[in-house]
Image (tube, rainbow, N blue to C red):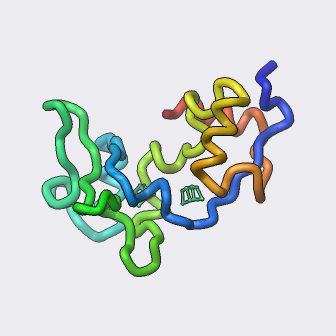
Amino acid sequence: MPWYDDGLQFECTVCGRCCGGGSGYVWVTQDDIGAMAKHLGLVPLVFEQAFVWTVRGHKRSLKEYPNGDCVMLSEKSRGCKVYEQRPVQCRTWPFWEQNTDIPASWKITAKFCPGCNRGRLYSAAEIEERRQQF
Ligand code: SF4
Ligand code: SF4
């Protein structure tokens, strides 16, 4: 039985912290690219050329602005321009394995992300599903 058997709360406050303000990777799959491209009315190749870069020769990540903001983060609203079709990495946050393996990891995650421990209660099954996706 996982330590989060009673579920965990999460509701994004749209603070934009996990999407910008520092360098990082937003890993994308071909499915992610296709979905985001469609959302923006672009063909996948054009989307990829404009917004994706290849890391260490094989992994692909969304580009970022010089200030560390993800290229899909709106400077004005601080919201995601492809929210409905955001990559799996973003959709499964904060329930990544590394954030939920032990209570201490979740506490560290909650210090970074103000959406943790508030709002909607996610069941253990929902958390497990997200852990397995990313
Ligand atoms: S850090 Fe948390 S609350 Fe802030 S935008 Fe990211 S998910 Fe939402
Ligand atoms: S794709 Fe959207 S949700 Fe994901 S990091 Fe970029 S702005 Fe944030």
Q: Nearer the viewer, residue 112 or 10?
A: 112
Q: Is residue 72 above or below residue 102?
A: below
The outermost residue toward the top is 1
- What residue lies at 69% left-to-right and 38% top-to-bottom? 107
Quadrant of the image where one finds ligand 2: bottom left
**Relative to 74, 94 lies left or right:** right
- What residue lies at 59% left-to-right and 44% top-to-bottom? 94
Q: Is residue 129 above or below residue 30?
A: above
Q: Nearer the viewer, residue 33 or 6?
A: 6
> How many discs mark residues in the rendered view?
0
What percent of the width, then of the height, locates residue 60? 24, 40
**Relative to 90, 43 lies left or right:** left
> Splitting the image into 4 quarters, where does residue 43 fall?
bottom left
- What residue lies at 55% left-to-right and 66% top-to-bottom? 15
What percent of the width, then of the height, locates residue 108? 62, 39
Q: Is residue 92 above or below residue 118?
A: above
Q: Nearer the viewer, residue 81 or 113?
A: 113
Q: Nearer the viewer, residue 130 or 109?
A: 109
What percent of the width, then of the height, locates residue 49? 13, 55
- What residue lies at 81% left-to-right and 19% top-to-bottom? 1
What percent of the width, then of the height, locates residue 84? 49, 62
The outermost residue toward the right is 6
**Relative to 118, 12 lies left or right:** left
**Relative to 94, 54 lies left or right:** left
